[in-house]
Amino acid sequence: MVRNRVLLVLAVVALLAAFGLAFVAHAPNRLVSGQPIPLLVAAGSRVFALLPGIVLLFAPFLPQRRAVHTVTVVAAAAFIVALWWLAGAHAAALAEAAPPAARTSLGAGFWTLFICTALALIEAVRRLGLRPASGVLIGAAVVAVVALLGAAGALDQLSIVKEYASRREVFADAVTRHLVIVLAALVPTVVLGVPLGILAHRRKSVAASAFPVLNVVQTIPSIALFALLIAPLSGLTALFPGLAALGISGIGLAPAVIALIFYSLLPVVRNTAEGLAGVSAAAIEAARAMGMTQQQVFWRVELPLALPVFLSGLRITTVQAIGLTAVAALIGAGGLGAIMFQGVFANALDLTMLGAVPVILLAVMADALLRLLTAYAERQPG
Amino acid sequence: MIELDRVSKRYGARAAVDGLSLMVERGEFFVVIGPSGSGKSTTLKLINRLVALSAGSIRIDGEDVLRFKAEELRRRMGYVFQSIGLFPHWTVERNIGTVPELLGWPKAKIRDRATELLTLLKLDPDGFRGKYPHQLSGGEQQRVGVARALAANPGILLMDEPFGAVDPITRGALQEEIARIHAESRTTIVFVTHDIDEALKLASRIAILEQGRLVQIGTPADLLSAPATDFVRDFVGREDLGVRLLSVEPVANRVRDGDAPGEPIAASASLRQALSRMIAQGTDRLAVVDADGRRLGVLMLADLTRP
């Protein structure tokens, strides 16, 4: 009897990946594609580490009680750590017998198993009905254990870690640059978007003109919008050479930040307006009848009650901006996207991953953090 | 004292309130009643300026309401309405303290006042002060709504169909609370309703509105015994006129010497309650006692029909 279809689908996909796809791939150097190595071969004598994975295969058929969810959470967390450890250990074993240029990279099987297990973990945490903060803590704990494995050297022979080791400084700069671009876009977005959202809520005419424009902007493909801004900005700097001295030019940071602001505005403006529209009319009438001034009604009643919806808009915008910033590397803005595209153009998958994985991680972390903040605002806004 | 002098409120060509004049004495329980669209809620909101006057004037203790800042005026009046409008993000205590907080009372004083009001409205202060509105039943929410309106000791309490959305049992209990609070505090209450039984039960005087105009004003007994127009007669209910008359007179008025077996009735109960008890118990006489349980005499079924 199937008791949990989500877990069943994940288990089937994970089984197919475990037996059908390469867990790791071994190549004599980074330019040739590697020899696929399936999970069981890679595990070898460490096959006992697969035990939590076997436990997970039973989860879809067990009665959906708290105890089962708890076991699922523990097993999934353990299996994620086990996957990294197995890949790292097998890479180390292969490295002993191979020349220094040889590479062991994570295969499609690894990534599929990893994602399926992470989704199973999220599903079980959700079913447990834990507080949002506890869910984030569990996620952070898993990331921390994997990071500890890395720090202890257990993952050193994986090619993604090797790529990192040879680019430590470039990588650190890219992460910083990425965050700077995101923040440089988000701060003006909030400063512009919140007042615009308030206006859109109060005046129908503002809403009627602002939303269609912002909606159209959202439909322009990001790469096209980045490219579109090159011409006018180059023109501007040609007209006013002073701008170039400020670091504004057709490529680089300026067009990236401007385009990001355009994209980011819609969720912020829309959710600010929607949040305000959702405030109970009775509460506003009561506030006025109690003798609150317009200002007091806004700050004490409307704003705190609209905050959760606004924060969920900010969350959408932040996650979107982190992703779009990766694309902005194509117009020379830098950031993690630069590493990613370097890998794509050099056909070096591990380098691509070194850029892509942190982007995903940043987006997931921002999402979790803002969800937490939203939940907090919902529970105790006053 | 609240004076409405030829007050009108127009929305475009339509007059919601049309040349209304009336006077509410200090300490009265004044009920404004009428069908939907009669302008009763608008009249109430004109008093605290939630709705702006189109014509006429409103004076409170002789001073025109337009002379005050609207916010200051509202802080001096309690306001309770059907949808309650508790602030969902504030605790019960902070909700009750809304107006005192606006007036800048010290924290300790606000806390003491909240304790006092929760007790007055029969809510356990320690159990309720930290709760959020969504944790309360409808009746409890409206008790908090009343407490919030009373927090800063307003001279006037405006109530707009306050018990319209609660179940009949809770409504009865809330009506008794508000009658008791009125009797103890002598706050002037202006109370809007469309429920004639509620009006007869609570009012010292009733004003009946029809299409924004005053049709009749008087005590409950006046309205029942001498309805001014057919509209009023329909409104107070032709069929139920008799029992409604009984509902506005206490047992004490018709008690005679004697005694009767069975459970006695309080002298303060209405004749309607007495009749109901007689029918339910299959008897034609009830012993009557005062508030301390002392025997006063007997009420006979025949006494109810005496003019």
Image (cartoon, helix red, strand yellow):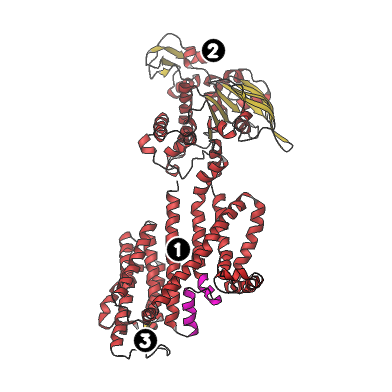
Query: Which quadrant of the structure image shows residue B287?
Result: top left
Picture mark count: 3
The 10 Å Cα crowd at callout 2, few under 14, some 14 to 19, many 20 or more, is few
User: Cβ–Cβ below 8 Å for labels 2 and 1?
Assistant: no
Q: Nearer the viewer, residue A211 or A51?
A: A211
Q: Earlier in the sequence, mark 3 or mark 1?
A: 3
Residue shown at 47% from the left, 36% from the top: B101
Circle nearer the viewer, 2 or 1? 1
Q: Nearer the viewer, residue B200 or B205?
A: B205
Query: Which quadrant of the structure image shows residue A220?
Result: bottom right
- Under circle 2, the secondary element is loop
Tell me the CA gap for discs 2 and 1. 78 Å
Q: Tell me, for residue A103, which label it has, or none.
A: 3
The answer for which chain carries disc 3 is A
The 10 Å Cα crowd at callout 1, few under 14, some 14 to 19, many 20 or more, is some
User: Cβ–Cβ below 8 Å for labels 3 and 1?
Assistant: no
Pointer 1: what residue? A367
Residue shown at 57% from the left, 26% from the top: B31
Same chain, labels 2 and 3: no
Residue A58: image x %, image y %? 32, 70
Instruction: Name the residue type under label 2.
Output: Arg
Instruction: Name the residue type under label 3.
Output: Arg
Residue B21 vs residue B182: left or right? right
Residue A209 vs residue A41: left or right? right
Pointer 2: what residue? B306
Q: Tell me, for residue A313, which label it has, or none.
A: none
Tell me the CA gap for discs 2 and 3. 110 Å
The answer for which chain carries disc 1 is A
Instruction: Judge whether residue A323 is colored magenta.
Output: no
